[in-house]
């Protein structure tokens, strides 16, 4: 049983082979956090980890005691985990331990996505009941430890057992108090088109963190933070990840207090998400996933990759090879008819694609982005014989068919808005902001969710649709739901997300064979909450091969390659105007979930040949790319950012694929080596280079080499300067390593 309860010491120790997580009930009844780190011995009393000896003697000042669920108003002055306002206006909440239960497995959360187990032996959970002595507030705190993963998950249910209502004003999914502040905080920050860029800096006194108040997790910040020791690298040293299984307004931050301890917390954004808990009611708070690693930042990522692809993603596509797709968007935008689509699909089939995706523009009268969102009926001007005929023609080519929807939106120019203006988010009488010429539908209103289930359901059942790209192209402004009373308006943002999750649950249950891909103007809602329903994400609207190196590198901190939509598009790139070689675009997109975002009819013979070879190469390596261990080797966020390298190594170390990219060619680069990681040092590997070429890099590397020398000495990237500088800008190479039997 990997959760130990010492009755006399009132200490709970969660452990597996790699790590320990220890909590303890203090004399006052307060639940203290003692430890999160490498495995410690069981059967021992760790009381001395509580560094404030007064607390044990019922002193109420809790600084700097490490706490499991800190509240406000009873002696702790750091950022809180849970705060309320009682009906009498008081805000004191003093939670003390009442009881606990330990059970095998991991329970699902009501109405919210979460990681799961397939067998009870995969994890154990302790459910701790905390009560406030002076009110009827109760908390059910769930902490789960996985047996074979360096992962602890946390969530809580806040229950009002009293006769009067309570306002929940802060609800963090996890709070992690650490005894020293010698940490750096790494966050994933960005904007549209440059999502998940790495920002990494030492902690200093005070608070630092990220949040979203946009109604989605956002392009700007990801619901994630990582703490690492100053000397930690990708491959070695201590690191802790905190990731939130949620897609709406969140807060993730770390505070260094006056005594040099750290409190990290992730949860609902306290400024924009509050909840009126009526007498006798409760609220489930989302799950946070904590990872501890002594194998560096890469170790944290590896744990998230495996957990999120194996026990967060769900449904029939979870373990299946994901189809190589051609998406119509950048190829034809809104300008197509049935024959054009069938011609594109037929060209896509020639390339080896497996899925053809019809993006925006197939419904209502949508010739640009100024109309028709909400009118989910086929535009018979473009597709006169309707979806079933089009899908049949595409299926006959031997391709799956996929479609784009943006269910949560409505255009002011649409039949839906004429009929139901009150379904758009906003306060009646106050102007609504239009963004991308559209409004957001009020997903907090059950009527809207029911309606969308009906209309989207009828689209999806009208033809054999194999894939859905579910978009969300604007942020939420003027938050207000006409379906909620005044005292519940500050629940709007969370209710919106509950509505989205509800719709996703209904549609994924009803259409279990459809592969869902989530999107929000690219990576505006790329988070674990979405991943639970849609096992892949459109990572970014920017497909430029150079920008993508940054985006995919940052995204890989948390999200597995199989979840990362990565497409090759035409040049000059539509977002940056940059022209990069076709094979470089592919060499970046290979390290994700490959697709083509272009009009395949426009490719010339040479390009067709190249793309055919790319698709064939990818299919051959897809299994390894999506299920091997990912290693970040050279960061585009370090140094001058001119180079990026990463690799995927098979779990049995029998094969590896290494991607190396150089943005600008520079004179006299000098000899350069790329050291690999994760290989079997005793094994020999046959090295091949993609794309095939007759040059020095190929000649220098294509041979049999030892795993040890590939890790200690490395691959050879530059010869004498002359030949490499003439290769030009935007170079890419892939090195394929196969074990020599
Ligand atoms: C968003 C998506 C794009 C495309 C367009 C269609 O911007 O990110 O991929 O689907 O919407 O309008």
Image: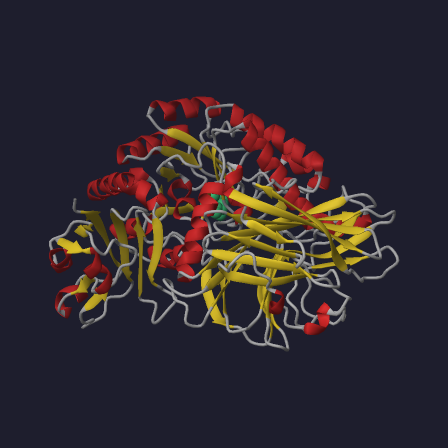
In this rendering, would 681 be left or right of 142?
A: left
In this rendering, would 132 be left or right of 734?
A: right
Q: How many marks?
A: 0
Q: Nearer the viewer, residue 387 or 200?
A: 200
Figure quadrant of residue 330: top left
Q: Residue at x 75, y 57 (%)?
A: 96
In this rendering, would 182 be left or right of 720?
A: right
Asked if residue 724 is positioned above or below residue 457 in the image, the reply reads: below
Task: Tell me how the rendering is colored.
Answer: secondary structure
Asked if residue 381 is positioned above or below residue 412 in the image, the reply reads: above
* Relative image position of residue 652 (x, y in whole percent): 29, 46
Can I make out residue 474 in this image? no
In this rendering, would 544 be left or right of 186?
A: left
* Relative image position of residue 435 (x, y in whole percent): 59, 51
Q: Nearer the viewer, residue 67 or 449?
A: 67
Asked if residue 675 is positioned above or below residue 463 in the image, the reply reads: below
Q: Residue at x 29, y 63 (%)?
A: 663
Q: From the image, which quarter does the C terminus lie in? A: top left
Figure quadrant of residue 61: bottom right
* Relative image position of residue 526 (x, y in whole percent): 50, 50
Can I make out residue 290 in this image? yes
Q: Nearer the viewer, residue 639 or 177?
A: 177
* Relative image position of residue 659 (x, y in whole percent): 28, 55
């Amino acid at each position: 049983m990997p959760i130990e309860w010492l009755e006399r010491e009132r200490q709970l120790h969660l452990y597996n082979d790699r790590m320990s997580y220890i909590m303890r009930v203090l004399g006052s009844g307060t639940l203290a956090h003692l430890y999160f780190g490498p495995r410690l011995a069981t059967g021992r009393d760790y009381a001395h980890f509580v560094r404030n000896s007064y607390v044990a003697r019922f002193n109420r000042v809790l600084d700097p005691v490490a706490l499991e669920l800190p509240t406000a108003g009873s002696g702790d002055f750091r950022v809180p985990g849970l705060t309320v306002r009682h009906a009498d206006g008081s805000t004191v909440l003093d939670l003390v331990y009442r009881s606990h239960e330990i059970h095998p497995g991991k329970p699902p959360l009501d109405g919210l996505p979460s990681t799961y187990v397939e067998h009870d032996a995969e994890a154990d959970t302790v459910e701790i009941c905390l009560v406030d002595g002076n009110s009827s507030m109760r908390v059910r705190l769930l902490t789960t430890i996985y047996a074979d993963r360096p992962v602890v998950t946390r969530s809580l249910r806040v229950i009002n057992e009293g006769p009067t209502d309570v306002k929940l004003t802060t609800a963090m999914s996890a709070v992690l108090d650490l005894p020293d502040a010698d940490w750096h905080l790494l966050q994933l920050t960005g904007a549209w088109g440059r999502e998940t860029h790495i920002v990494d800096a030492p902690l200093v006194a005070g608070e630092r963190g990220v949040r979203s108040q946009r109604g989605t997790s956002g392009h700007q910040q990801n619901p994630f933070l990582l703490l690492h020791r100053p000397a930690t690298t990708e491959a070695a040293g201590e690191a802790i990840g905190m990731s939130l299984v949620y897609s709406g307004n969140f807060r993730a931050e770390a505070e260094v207090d006056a005594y040099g301890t750290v409190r990290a917390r992730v949860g609902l954004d306290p400024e924009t998400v509050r909840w009126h808990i009526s007498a006798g009611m409760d609220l489930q708070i989302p799950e946070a996933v904590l990872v501890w690693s002594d194998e560096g930042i890469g170790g944290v990522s590896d744990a998230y990759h495996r957990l999120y692809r194996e026990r967060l993603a769900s449904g029939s596509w979870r373990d299946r090879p994901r189809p190589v797709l051609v998406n119509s968007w950048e190829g034809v935008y809104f300008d197509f008819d049935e024959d054009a689509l069938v011609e594109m699909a037929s060209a896509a089939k020639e390339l080896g694609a497996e899925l053809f995706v019809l993006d925006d523009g197939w419904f209502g009268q949508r010739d640009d982005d100024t109309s028709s969102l909400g009118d989910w009926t086929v535009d018979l001007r473009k597709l006169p014989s309707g979806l079933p005929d089009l899908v049949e023609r595409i299926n006959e080519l031997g391709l799956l068919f996929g479609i784009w929807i943006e269910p949560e939106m409505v255009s002011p120019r649409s039949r839906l808005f004429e009929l139901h203006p009150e379904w758009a988010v906003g306060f009646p009488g106050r102007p609504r902001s239009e963004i991308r010429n559209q409004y957001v539908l009020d997903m907090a209103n059950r009527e809207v969710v029911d309606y969308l289930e009906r209309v989207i359901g009828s689209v999806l059942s009208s033809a054999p649709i194999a894939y859905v790209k579910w978009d969300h192209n604007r942020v939420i402004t003027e938050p207000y739901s006409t379906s909620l009373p005044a005292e519940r308006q500050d629940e709007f943002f969370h209710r919106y997300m509950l509505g989205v999750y509800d719709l996703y649950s209904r549609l994924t249950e009803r259409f279990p064979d459809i592969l869902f891909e989530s999107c929000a103007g690219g990576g505006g809602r790329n988070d674990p909450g979405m991943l639970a329903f849609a096992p892949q994400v459109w990572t970014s609207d920017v497909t430029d091969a150079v920008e993508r190196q940054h985006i995919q590198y940052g995204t890989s901190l948390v999200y597995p390659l199989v979840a990362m939509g990565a497409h090759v598009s035409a040049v000059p790139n539509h977002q940056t105007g940059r022209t990069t070689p076709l094979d470089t675009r592919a060499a970046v997109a290979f390290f994700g979930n490959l697709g083509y975002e272009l009009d395949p009819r426009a490719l010339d013979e040479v390009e067709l040949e190249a793309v055919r070879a790319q698709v064939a190469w990818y299919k051959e390596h897809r299994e390894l790319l999506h299920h091997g261990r990912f290693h970040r080797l050279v960061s585009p966020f370090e140094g001058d950012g001119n180079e990026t390298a990463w690799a995927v190594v098979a779990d049995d170390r029998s094969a590896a694929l290494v991607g190396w990219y150089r943005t600008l060619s520079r004179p006299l680069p000098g000899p350069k080596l790329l050291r690999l990681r994760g290989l079997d040092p005793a094994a020999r590997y046959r090295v091949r280079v993609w794309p095939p070429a007759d040059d020095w890099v190929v000649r220098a590397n294509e041979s049999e080499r030892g795993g040890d020398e590939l890790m200690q000495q490395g691959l050879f990237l530059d010869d004498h300067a002359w030949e490499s500088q003439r290769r030009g800008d935007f170079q890419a190479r892939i090195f394929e390593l196969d074990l020599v039997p």
